[in-house]
Amino acid sequence: MHLAQLNVAHLRAPLDSPELADFVDLLEPINELSDAAPGFVWRLKAGDDPRETVDHDYGDHLVINFSVWASREELWNFVYRSAHLPVLQRRREWFLRVAEPYSVMWWIPEGYIPSLAEGMERLELLRREGPTPEAFTFKDFYDAPAGVSASGGSPGAGSVAASLPAAAEVRK
């Protein structure tokens, strides 16, 4: 099984505004970092321009990041133990705070690429019902379905990521 993740962010200003220049400048190096990270499988791309964001019909000023990873641990390491973390820590400069969940994860079969509509449905499921095996977060994580290990280990074997502090604590 692979781990799909989707997160959305509401921009404080249009992408071409001076307020978001640093964010736009960081898109290419962070996307290159993710693409080269251990465990990275796939991400939704806007096109050939690495500074471009994904076009969608889910509202103006909404930036979407959508990717697939081999395991929770490898996604965690990219998000919180790489050069991505300092960029993540600046998110309040560029994005509005929201009271509802903005990030969701779920397990998918290896080789399957989920659609953006599926990802948005999973986010809505999380918002509506809270964490479930079909839509969860780092903090409220569900292991891969029984009999299958996302990290290649034996079923039920704990991963290093399971012992890491919750994402909310890292964001202080």
Image: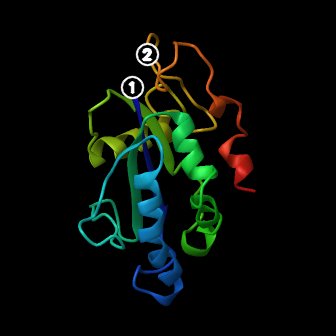
Report the residue marked by disc 1: 1
Quadrant including the C terminus: bottom right
Q: Position of residue 111 (x, y in %)?
A: 27, 32
Labels in figure, total: 2
Indicate which disc, 1 or 2, sits on the residue closer to the N terminus.
1
Instruction: Give the structural element (helix, strand or loop) at label 2.
Output: loop
**Residues packed near mark 1 inside 10 Å, few (<14), some (14 to 19) or many (20 plus):** many
Residue 169 visible to an observer of this rendering: yes
Camera-nearest residue between 138 and 163 = 163
As drawn, is 53 to the left or to the right of 29?
left
Whether the residues at callouts 1 and 2 have beta carbons within 8 Å, the answer is: yes
Q: Position of residue 13 (x, y in %)?
A: 47, 80
Q: Position of residue 79 (x, y in %)?
A: 57, 51
Check the image and report above or below for 82 versus 156: below
Residue 148 is labelled as 2
The amino acid pointed to by label 1 is Met
- Residue at the location (66% across, 45% down)? 167
Residue at 41% of width from left, 70% of height from top? 28
Would residue 33 be found to the left or right of residue 159 on screen? Answer: left
Image location of residue 10, percent across then percent down? 48, 66
Q: Please name whichever residue, 119 or 50, is drawn nearer the observer in this view of the structure.
A: 50
Quadrant in which the N terminus is drawn = top left
Type of amino acid under label 2: Val
